[in-house]
Structures are given as structure tokens and as C-alpha cells.
Amino acid sequence: MFRAIPLLFMSANMAYAETPTVVSSAGDRYSISENENGGILTSLYPKSRFVEAGANSYVVDGLDVIYFGKDCDAFHKVFGKGTFGWANGGFLATFESGAEIGFPRQDLPWEHLTKCRL
């Protein structure tokens, strides 16, 4: 009986450690993945984004997904096209809409995208 407790504790910690994440400057946690085009960050929890359009303003709900391309390009379904880069202080996506999503004091999670410097 006493041997089962440490094994259960160990397997719970291992499951958590298998999911790499980063945290944005707004406090949102994102899971890390990649595809043939670059890297992808997906929020662990749904977000609401307000899109200002005067009388036609609206809210977009759902998981937040940020795409990081091999050519230092970025894309977000609400903020549109942009660029990204990293430096010793973290990494940052800046969009043509003026929005920015930063990840301070964290390394860029994709080794093959480190050519994209701020």
C-alpha cells in the first residue's frame, strides 16, 4: 500500500511536465506546438477579445492561437498579420493592427526560429 502512493504522485508530476507552456505578459498560459511552417501557441483556456469597430464592434470568444512563421512572420485570427522576434528579455509578437502579445523573461520555445531577433 505504501509503495503505490509514491508511484501515483510521480505519474501525476510526469503528466504535468510533458506539457510545455509559456505565459504571456497578460498572465495567459499557452501550450507549445509546431508544424512544418513554424511554431504555434494555443491558450489553455478560452479568451474573449474585443474587436473595436465603432457601431459594429464585437467580441471573439475561444482559444487564443498565435502562429509564428519561419520567416519571422506572425498571425492571429483577431489581430491579423504581424512579425515576431526574441531577445534576452523574452519574445514578442507585434501585429499590423497595433496589438502586441509578449512573453517576458522566457526563451523562444522553437530552436529553429531563433534567427528572428528583436
Image (cartoon, grey):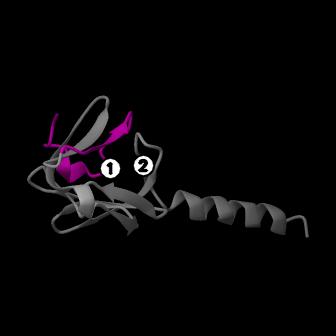
Residue 49 magenta: no
The numbered dot on residue 109 is 1
Identify the residue at horizontal 43%, vertical 60% (top origin): 47
Quarter of the picture holding the N terminus: bottom right
From which residue to which does the magenta span run?
Answer: 98-118
C-beta proximity under 8 Å, tags 1 and 2: yes
Name above or below for residue 23 compared with residue 38: above
- The kind of secondary structure element at disc 1 is loop
How far across and down, in percent of the image, does residue 3 sit?
84, 66
Q: Amino acid at mark 2?
A: Val
Outermost residue on the right side: it is 1
Outermost residue on the left side: it is 71
How far across and down, in percent of the image, does residue 88 sit?
29, 29
How far across and down, in percent of the image, does residue 104 sit?
37, 35
Outermost residue on the front side: it is 55
Q: Quadrant of residue 57?
A: bottom left
Answer with left or right where residue 7 lies relative to residue 60. right
Quarter of the picture holding the C terminus: top left
Q: Quadrant of residue 100?
A: top left
Q: Which residue is mark 2?
A: 22
- The kind of secondary structure element at disc 2 is strand
Residue 60 in view in this figure = yes
Of 36 and 10, the residue lying toward us: 36
Q: Amino acid at mark 1?
A: Pro
How far across and down, in percent of the image, does residue 105 sit?
38, 33
Q: CA distance from mark 1 to mark 2?
A: 8 Å
